[in-house]
Image (tube, rainbow, N blue to C red):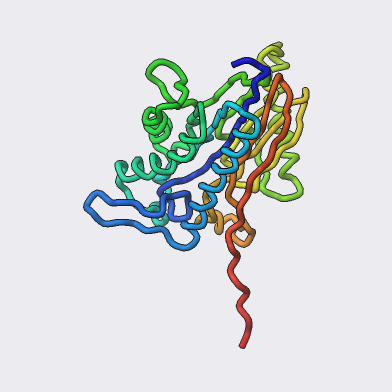
Amino acid sequence: MANDKPALVVGVADWHTNSTVGLNPISLRRELGSQHVAGKIGRATWRSWLAFWRVVEEKRAQYQATVFTFAVGDLGDKNSHSNIQLITASKVEIQDAMAEVAEPMAQASDYVFILRGTESHVGPNGEMEEWLARDLDNAVPYSEGVASWWVANVEIAGKKFMVTHHPPTVSRRPWTLRAAVSRSASIVAGQHLDAGDTRNKPDVCMWAHAHTRGALAYGMGDTTGIFLPPWQLHTGFAHRIGAGSAPRCVGGFWMVVRDGKVLEWEFERWWPQREKLWNAP
């Protein structure tokens, strides 16, 4: 595309569709005719998902932009560690749910890049995300016969982007989160500089996996780093590592780029309603 045409770059990640606390359709039809119906929190997460894509549509119209969406891994979930918080063990039912979740994204986007996530969630070699990428008409394939990406290195509207699921370093502490984003961006920039590959050094790096509120920070060589927020709330694992007491949001990220310049960017976040304090009688 011409660099002077605005591009709206969108990042969403960690749907964990099929997790009871992930991003799921309101109603999921089972193979044998029964239905799984989302509870209060699940319905709120779904409404937030639809609200996010309304924001994208508004920005698309405002800038008359082409929309490039990156779905950055762990989009489904058939957790190999434990199935206690899964809706179904049926791969067909999981694929149907992922396809329904992807519909608003596909409708709001001109181009979609599907990134592979963690194999313990999405199967060997990211098979669930490969299936989803093959199912979407506007998904950009990695190569002939391979629809999804481990790492997407792309240039859009004069900006070079590197997008992948796992960041090189992570922090979940509020006071060190942006430092971790900056370190990650610096690591990638340093690897390119060490190799003498300044031409392909990304301007913007985007990661998922950390399940934080999302953050943007700057690293070595003017490289921007972004950690995306998830669409999954607290799992049993989150409680085990001591994160269950902290509020967790769901959301996504967008950035408007034209002629190599960032015109505007924002995280869109939705915070689930907190439980009321128990008061002693």
Between 57 and 76, the one nearer to me in the picture: 57
- Please say if 112 is above or below 31: above
**Lateral position of residue 120 relative to residue 177, left or right:** left
Locate residue 53, reporting x and y percent.
54, 42
User: Furthest-bottom residue in view?
Assistant: 281
**Lateral position of residue 8 relative to residue 187, left or right:** left
Q: Residue at x 59, y 28 (%)?
A: 163
Can the viewer see residue 120 in this picture?
Answer: no
Q: Quadrant of the C terminus?
A: bottom right
- Please say if 21 is above or below 193: below
**Lateral position of residue 17 relative to residue 170, left or right:** left
Locate residue 89, reporting x and y percent.
32, 48
Locate residue 170, reporting x and y percent.
65, 40
Q: Residue at x 34, y 57 (%)?
A: 36
Q: Residue at x 60, y 65 (%)?
A: 274
Between 72 and 80, the one nearer to me in the picture: 72
Between 168 and 261, the one nearer to me in the picture: 261
- Please say if 237 is above or below 259: below
Can the viewer see residue 65 in this picture?
Answer: yes
Locate residue 203, reporting x and y percent.
70, 23
Residue 247, by quadrant, is bottom right
Q: Residue at x 43, y 55 (%)?
A: 20
Q: Quadrant of the N terminus?
A: top right
Residue 100, by quadrant, is top left
- Please say if 82 is above or below 190: below
Callout count: 0
**Lateral position of residue 200 relative to residue 26, left or right:** right
